[in-house]
Image (tube, coloured by chain):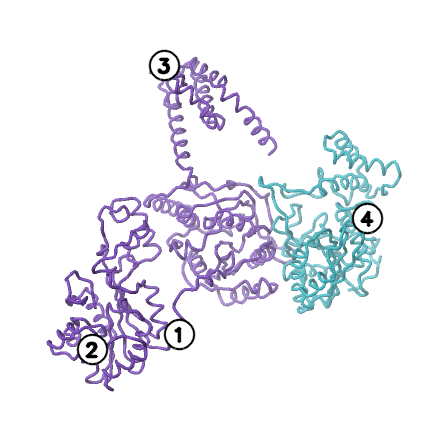
């Protein structure tokens, strides 16, 4: 159904966003991606769109790329190649930002460009491959009232955060692969790009969706492939950017979601750390605090946000 | 022209008697077995008949009118003297030969044709075969052909070591112009329009080429000979001892293609064939596995989905999953149904169908990482032809139904339970490698004839891995490239089969290993010495004779610790690498006790030895090596 922005805020009757023949915007922010990676993802997406349109779950799909890279990832020939890979199943739009907007601001800009009548946003990393029946599977729960986000399962490394094994309810959804009703997204002003650059923007978005009463679901039947690898010892391989931005975002999350005790704890650890990345993250936070540019803390009674050590949900296992 | 008995002929025509177990007997047996209703007076043409010793039994058994054809007058004279029709015929180009034979036949019906041990003497055998094919087709006649088998184990074994003995008579008669194996004979016959439908090969385990008796590959008592014979039997079952290849053919259309192999066409293969077994009961995991294959950074693959004993509804469901795939994956994927057999049958069928240069087993619940194929290829580039072994993790999973949809839920962290590298000796005891972590070279199945043992109901992959790796070797990468799912809710083979069954299969595999020669990779001698030494050390510690009736002495624990310390020093890389530095000391008589002598040293002597080792120049020089290793260890 079509829901006017803000209809549900402060009401107990939450809407269901599900609708047949929905219009979908798929959006991804590029950053130095190879055209081969993008093309492989587009081929997978086009097939999923084709199947979802045939089944009636969708009527139209627009794939919108933003590019935060120092150089455009797609020139005219590249764009033509990508459009060719869709086999006409979806329209492809490309916006070279000319600056690194990060994940949050980039996605906000792309969402602003959604065509009239768009019902849902599928937000994904540009190198994610969706499974053929993914769109139908993640749209189905929106037929029920109060569903605000549905996240797909990533392979080959499943995200370890916990979810209810029958309802799929979970604390937050990663924007590597998640479906959000556009009206809901706009209603809560999208990602908090002033606070988060690259990490935890998705956690914060989910918390705010839950803050207004909607449920965030994880659907393991919907799968997508995200090229992540393990170290030879079997551990997670974080990138350098992940190391810094997740440290910075950790401080922001604790502050924004009213956990000054955690802020102090993290700051204490970061400032005394031998790791320059952590000290830089602490310095950035303290500068913003001094400048008064930190976000207003919310959820004072801790009814939404979850903090489990440095995690924002209980995890089933450690990576 | 037959030349298989060492009776010296005149003009290279040999007079071989008819024997039931000779090529004559086998040819007649085939004709009798497949005899058709023929009109009175129908002919049997014997091309290259020589003395035609088949003539009498053939006319007696089949009631045909025998006509011997040859270019040699002595054999023909013999036949004529025995009352048979003969004709002098030269086998030249196709049309000339065909015309000559038609002239012999003179519009009489032909029931059958034989050309025994002649083809190998002809400079243009294909022309003769085509002429025979045309003649046979006009008469609906059967054709029996025989040639010597150049792939006899005796010839192959000697040739392997570079020896080829051309002989006066026999398998490698000096008058032969062509050589044949079962495969090449059948290919040439088909190309000429003669379709073999039965065979009556003659066998001699020890042929006329079985000399010299003490050749290491011919002598029955050698390990090497046993290994080669075992390999040959596996690669070419039933043909190692074939002496003459005998085929009965029906005429049919000439294929129009040459029977020669075009080697360059064989290279047009995908890098990897993925054999994926499914029973159609886990479509959700099948979808996951196919998605991960689409995500490969190296897409040079073909996917064979082996539908095993699928019910009609399951066939449709699996087909639907494949049809759902994006085009690049759909074109690379095909469903092959296997209607019978146990869980191992689909592997044999899939490997037989595989076109890839390597073949991997990826079950419908396995998960490859994006660089799964890429890592196999890197290994191949460094070590072509080996078993390629990557590293994998195991993850516990269970089915969950979320919002009425069946999905799979990881329940535990990916566990690094498999060793990072492949150790053949460790694998002699039990399996340490999940099938998803391996790529087998195609030749293991197609050229060595190594097939999965369908008598095994579990651990068939371990059995196969060992049989292949012990022959072609294995190379490994420490890269983690796959997730082996460990079902927590009764979905896996370990729940379907009893512990007794697992144990029985395990014991069977061990027995199979024990019954075959063992070909170990470079470096194994050192490993075996080390393991034997370790066993000795352990026994020495455990069996240190206690003083009868006396409780352990207070110093025993110290002595054992010192034994361990000295033993470890002797086994360390530093000590082994710096061995040349101690050469002068050894030459001048200044030597330390060797590894086995330390067990007889007293506790003070051991302490002195440990101190002495640490004071040696070689130990001091290698200190940086130990420090570097320590740093690496701490880092990792």
- Residue hosting label 3: B550
Q: Give the CA separation, mark 1 to mark 4.
A: 72 Å
Residue B88: mark in rendering: 2
Quadrant that contains the N terminus of chain B: bottom left
Determine the CA span between mark 2 and mark 3: 102 Å
- Marks 3 and 4, Cα distance to the nearest angstrom? 80 Å
Q: Which chain does tag 1 point to?
A: B
Chain for disc number 3: B
Depth check, mark 2 against mark 1: the one in front is 2
- x and y percentages locating residue B52 in the rendered image: 17, 72
Mark 3 touches mark 1? (CB < 8 Å): no
Residue at the disc numbered 4 = A193
Q: Mark 1 or mark 3, which is nearer the start of the sequence? A: 1
Is residue B187 shown above or below B88?
above
Is residue B443 or residue B433 the one in the foreground?
Answer: B443
Q: Which mark is residue B255?
A: 1
Q: Residue at x 49, y 22 (%)?
A: B618
Foreground disc of the pair 2, 3:
2
Q: Chain of mark 2?
A: B
Give the camera-side residue of B593 and B437: B593
Crowdedness near tag 3: few (<14), some (14–19) or many (≥20) residues, C-alpha within 10 Å: few
Task: Residue at the far front: name it.
Answer: B11
What chain is the purple one? B
* Residues indicated by labels 3 and 4 sit on the same polypeptide chain: no
């Amino acid at each position: 159904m079509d829901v006017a922005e803000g209809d549900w805020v402060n009401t107990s009757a939450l809407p269901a966003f599900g609708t047949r023949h929905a219009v979908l915007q798929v959006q991804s922010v590029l950053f130095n991606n190879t055209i081969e990676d993008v093309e492989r993802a587009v081929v997978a997406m086009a097939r999923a769109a084709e199947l979802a349109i045939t089944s009636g779950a969708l009527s139209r799909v627009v794939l919108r790329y933003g590019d935060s890279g120092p150089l455009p990832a797609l020139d005219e020939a590249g764009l033509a190649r990508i459009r060719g890979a869709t086999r006409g199943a979806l329209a492809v739009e490309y916006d070279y930002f000319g600056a690194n907007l990060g994940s949050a601001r980039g996605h906000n800009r792309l969402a602003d460009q959604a065509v009239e009548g768009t019902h849902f946003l599928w937000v994904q990393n540009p190198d994610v491959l969706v499974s053929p029946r993914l769109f139908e599977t993640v749209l189905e729960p929106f037929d029920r009232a109060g569903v605000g986000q549905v996240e797909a399962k990533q392979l080959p490394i499943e995200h370890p955060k916990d979810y209810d094994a029958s309802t799929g309810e979970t604390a937050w959804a990663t924007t590597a692969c998640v479906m959000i009703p556009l009206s809901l997204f706009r209603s809560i002003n999208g990602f908090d790009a002033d606070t988060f650059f690259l990490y935890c923007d998705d956690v914060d978005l989910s918390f705010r969706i839950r803050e207004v009463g909607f449920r965030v679901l994880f659907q393991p039947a919907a799968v997508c492939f995200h090229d992540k690898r393990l170290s030879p010892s079997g551990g997670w391989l974080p990138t350098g950017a992940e190391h810094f931005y997740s440290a910075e975002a950790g401080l922001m999350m604790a502050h924004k979601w009213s956990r000054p005790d955690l802020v102090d704890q993290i700051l204490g650890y970061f400032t005394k750390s031998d790791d320059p990345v952590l000290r830089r993250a602490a310095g950035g936070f303290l500068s913003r605090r001094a400048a008064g540019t930190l976000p207003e803390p919310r959820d004072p009674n801790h009814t939404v946000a979850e903090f489990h050590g440095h995690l924002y949900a209980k995890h089933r296992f450690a990576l | 022209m037959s030349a298989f008995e060492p009776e010296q002929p005149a003009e290279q025509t040999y007079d071989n008697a008819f024997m039931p177990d000779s090529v004559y007997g086998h040819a007649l047996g085939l004709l009798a077995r497949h005899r058709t209703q023929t009109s009175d007076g129908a002919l049997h043409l014997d091309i290259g008949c020589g003395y035609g010793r088949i003539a009498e039994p053939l006319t007696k058994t089949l009631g045909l009118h025998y006509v011997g054809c040859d270019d040699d007058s002595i054999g023909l004279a013999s036949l004529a003297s025995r009352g048979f029709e003969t004709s002098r015929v030269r086998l030249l180009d196709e049309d000339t030969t065909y015309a000559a034979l038609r002239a012999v036949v003179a519009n009489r019906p032909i029931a059958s044709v034989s050309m025994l041990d002649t083809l190998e003497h002809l400079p243009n055998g294909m022309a003769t075969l085509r002429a025979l094919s045309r003649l046979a087709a006009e008469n609906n006649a059967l054709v029996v052909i025989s040639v010597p088998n150049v792939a006899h184990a005796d010839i192959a074994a000697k040739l392997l070591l570079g020896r080829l003995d051309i002989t006066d008579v026999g398998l490698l008669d000096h008058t032969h112009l062509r050589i044949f194996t079962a495969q090449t004979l059948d290919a040439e016959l088909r190309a000429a329009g003669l379709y073999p439908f039965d065979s009556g090969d003659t066998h001699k385990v020890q042929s006329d080429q079985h000399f010299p008796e003490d050749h290491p590959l011919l002598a029955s008592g050698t390990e090497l000979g046993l290994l080669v014979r075992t390999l040959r039997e596996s690669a070419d079952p039933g043909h190692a001892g074939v002496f003459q290849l005998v085929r009965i053919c029906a005429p049919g259309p000439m294929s129009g293609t040459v029977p020669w192999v075009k080697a360059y066409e064989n290279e047009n293969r995908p890098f990897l064939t993925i054999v994926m077994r499914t029973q159609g009961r886990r479509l959700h995991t099948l979808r996951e596995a196919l998605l991960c294959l689409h995500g490969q950074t190296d897409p040079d693959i073909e996917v064979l989905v082996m539908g095993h004993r699928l019910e009609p509804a399951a066939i449709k469901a699996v087909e639907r999953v494949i049809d759902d795939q994006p085009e690049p994956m759909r074109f690379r994927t095909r469903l092959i149904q296997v209607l019978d057999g146990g869980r191992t049958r689909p592997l044999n069928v899939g490997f037989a169908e595989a076109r890839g240069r390597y073949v991997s087993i990826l079950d419908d619940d396995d998960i490859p990482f994006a660089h799964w194929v890429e890592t196999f290829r890197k290994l191949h580039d460094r070590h072509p032809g080996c078993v390629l072994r990557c590293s994998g993790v195991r993850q516990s999973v269970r089915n969950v139904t979320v919002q009425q949809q069946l999905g799979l839920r990881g329940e535990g962290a990916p566990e690094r339970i498999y060793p990072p590298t492949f150790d053949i000796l460790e694998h002699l005891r039990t399996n340490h490698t999940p099938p998803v972590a391996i790529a087998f070279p195609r030749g293991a199945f197609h050229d060595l004839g190594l097939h999965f043992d369908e008598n095994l109901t579990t651990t068939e992959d371990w059995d196969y891995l060992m049989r292949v790796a012990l022959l072609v070797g294995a190379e490994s990468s420490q890269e983690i490239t796959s997730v082996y799912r460990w079902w927590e809710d009764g979905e896996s083979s370990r729940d379907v089969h009893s512990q007794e069954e697992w144990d029985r299969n395990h014991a069977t595999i061990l027995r199979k290993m024990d019954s075959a020669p063992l070909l170990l990779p470079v470096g194994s001698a050192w490993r075996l010495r080390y393991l034997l030494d370790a066993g000795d050390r352990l026994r020495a510690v455990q069996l240190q004779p206690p003083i009868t009736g006396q409780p352990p002495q207070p110093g025993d624990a110290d002595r054992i610790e010192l034994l361990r310390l000295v033993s470890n020093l002797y086994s360390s890389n530093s000590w082994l690498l710096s061995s040349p530095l101690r050469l002068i000391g050894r030459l001048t008589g200044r030597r330390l006790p060797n590894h086995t002598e330390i067990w007889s040293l007293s506790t003070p002597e051991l302490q002195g030895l440990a101190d002495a080792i640490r004071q040696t120049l070689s130990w001091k020089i290698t200190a940086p090596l130990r420090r570097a290793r320590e740093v690496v260890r701490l880092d990792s």
